[in-house]
Image (cartoon, rainbow, N blue to C red):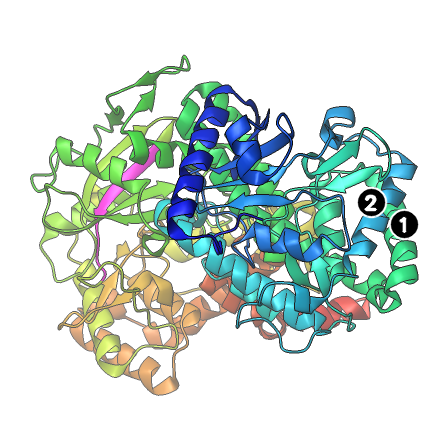
Amino acid sequence: MGALLDPRPVGERATLDDTYQAFVGWAAAEGQSASGYHNQNYVLPLTEPMARALRRPVGTSVTVRIRRSDVLPVVIRTWQDEGEILAAIKGVLPHVPECLVQREHFAIHSHVEGVPLSAVCANGKPVDTLLIKALAGLLAQMTQVRRGALPALPSVWPRNDTDSQGFLRTLAHLADRQIRRPNRAVFGGLFASLGIPEDALLRLAERVPAMARRPYSLLHADLHRDNLIVSYGGAPPLICVDWELATYGDPLHDLATHLVRMQYPPHQWDEVVEAWAEAMQRTRPAAVNGLARDLRHYVAFERAQSVYPDVMRAARFLEETRTQKSLNEATAEVRRALEAAAEPLRLTNLPGELEIERALFRWLTSRSGGSYDGQGRLVQTFRWEPDRRLPEHPDFPVSAVREALVAEGAAPAGRVFKGTAHLNTVVRVPSIDFPVVVRRKLPDVCRRERSFLSEHAVLRAIEQADIAVAAPRALALGESYPNDRFAIHTYVGPRDIDKPLRHPEHGLLPHEADALVDQLCALTRVKYKQVDPTSGEGNFHHWLRGQLVTLVGELPKESQQLARLLGLPEADRLQAILSRHEVSHRKPALLHGDLNPWNLVRRDDLLALTIIDWEMALVGDPLYDLVRHMHLTPTRPEIRDRMFRRWEKKLPPEYTRDWRQDWRVYRWIEIVRSAYIDLDRIVTGASLDAPNVKRAVDSYAVTLAVATGSLGLPVRPTANPHLARALA
């Protein structure tokens, strides 16, 4: 083999290299091309100089493999030199290609005569039973390659050559290190906007269960129809090519990747597994230990890690073609990849087609600065339509809006935050000296709790009131293609926008409790009539409980059925129970409406906290905002008492009268509300990845017990004890 370590003198090697380079150049110009993802392959006969250099007959067919420079890192590589792998397996699998020359950017292999299996049996089509048996025999034969003949393994490899659990964990870590991380700068924000957490693969590694021990062996690791050659002579019937992704580990991994990448019709999976097990029983019986139980873990990993290359390839395809048709195709491919990876990566609230399309388009915009005109053609100037309800802000001109929208799709993963209803992206605009947040409402999100005021109007009213309330400023409002509404706010996090936001998820510190009370008191000075001229009229408490009854009545059938099963009353009965309590009238004020810990951002000044996410703002009893905050946030009794005392002291009596007897009524309403909303989240799976939702769902058994007790109802034992245990 003419490998890099060539024993010939330097001068002779230089002459050979000139010969090789000339032949490779001729191959690229004249050879019959077969594109692979990582290499461009050319089949052509040896010229006289090359035949002399390789000591082969003139006219012998060879395959010239030229490494593609534009390829994304989307695979796990154990070894870098395919030639060393081929040399190691030649004695066991004599028909595999022989590496004749190996250089950094190209290799020359002996040519395997035959046709790819994909040419005679396309993806999705059934494979002949005899070919399946031959395939199984090939996989079994690989176990005969000695580890000592193979190149040295990386230091991260498990030390025990039968540790199946350790091998799968190593694969997950390598996928994160070799696939996700190298592509993070370009695609990280896209992954985040699609709901794929940055640590998804690391979490998968942590969840790998104990598995049966199986002796490691050589694995091809990429055995699909293009890499299987059906020989002309039939002896052997199949030959494996393209060994650059080969590895050493649990043979069950090779079976799993083969099953997925071969795209067998579902009814053939069992046939392939049985053929593999029979072949392994003859050569390496211990390889089938735990087959029935453990194969699914490797299949799950293959589908999980594939989401990264599949999304990146779809995005790159869109970037190269830039048509509406390719946007539709890329959207469909990304959706398929997300659905396949959802279970192993535990992705919740998968984005629908519209959300995926918008995410891909924003990514493309950041790469090209262009926009579709609706006819499949790219217009070089990015277009967006301003919403006239929010006039141009003096600190943020129209030109800055375009810059922010172009920067949005290029934001790294650490600056993209996907919440229960919004996608927030932090960007820097070259012409503006402060960072901003591009805020988009997620499509197809059904929030049980309605919003009543426009967030931009609330924020503009707070800004104009010139009060000591730390809130974002609304800078712009509009719509970009395709019908994707957005708002741009000032960013309220740390100066270094790559540092995470700090939230009081474990409760407020004393000075933070004081600062929040002061800001809620300051909200009473906002002229709420300019936000909603009809607000502040009528009985707020009656309206609030009516909203809760309506919410319960509009829950999906499945949620209502489970609520009844658990002893929660239906809407009519709930109305009757809630009507037993009344509260005093207090002067209305602007309320935030959703003061959970993740809507409070810690800051290092006298204001202590910035209040974000004002979409649930409303006008009503100021006592309610304070009590709802205490319900949503862990609040120690001493902090609760401190907040009430300060709140009563700082506000005039018309805002606070009779609060001591009324605050428990609002707390009761919020407990009951949580019993229904959290149950609906459990049933529908909505927003379960949001930290405030996860906390609420994790403690649902307590919420249910307190709610039914406060309603004067017993907790009804469920007919299914497993359901009761699950809720607990």
User: In this rendering, is residue 216 above or below 471?
Assistant: below
Give the amino acid type for the residue marked by disc 2 in the picture: Leu
Sequence-wise, which precedes: disc 2 or disc 1? 2
The numbered dot on residue 135 is: 2
Can residue 389 be seen in this snapshot? yes
The answer to which image quadrant residue 228 occupies is top right
Element type at marker 2?
Answer: helix
Q: Is residue 556 left or right of residue 67?
A: right
* Residue 632 percent location from the top left of the image: 42, 68
Is residue 576 magenta-colored? Answer: no
Nearer-the-camera pick, 257 or 535:
257
Which residue is found at the position 49% from the left and 32% from the top?
354
Q: Is residue 564 left or right of residue 614?
A: right
Can residue 197 be seen in this snapshot? no
Nearer-the-camera pick, 57 or 578:
57
Which residue is found at the position 81% from the left and 49% from the top?
138
Residues at discs 2 and 1 in contact (Cβ within 8 Å): yes
Disc 2/disc 1 C-alpha distance (Å): 9 Å
The answer to which image quadrant residue 293 occupies is bottom right
Q: Magenta span: helix, strand or loop, mainly?
A: strand
Give the residues drawn in magenta, as a range: 485-493
Is residue 491 magenta-colored? Answer: yes
In the picture of the structure, the residue carrying the numbered disc 1 is: 275
Give the amino acid type for the residue marked by disc 1 in the picture: Ala
Which residue is found at the position 75% from the left and 71% from the top?
211
Nearer-the-camera pick, 607 or 514:
607
* Residue 570 percent location from the top left of the image: 66, 54
Image quadrant where one finds the C terminus: bottom right
Element type at marker 1?
Answer: helix
Which residue is found at the position 77% from the left and 73% from the top?
213
Q: Nearer the viewer, mark 2 or mark 1?
A: 2
User: In this rendering, is residue 273 above or below 108?
Assistant: below
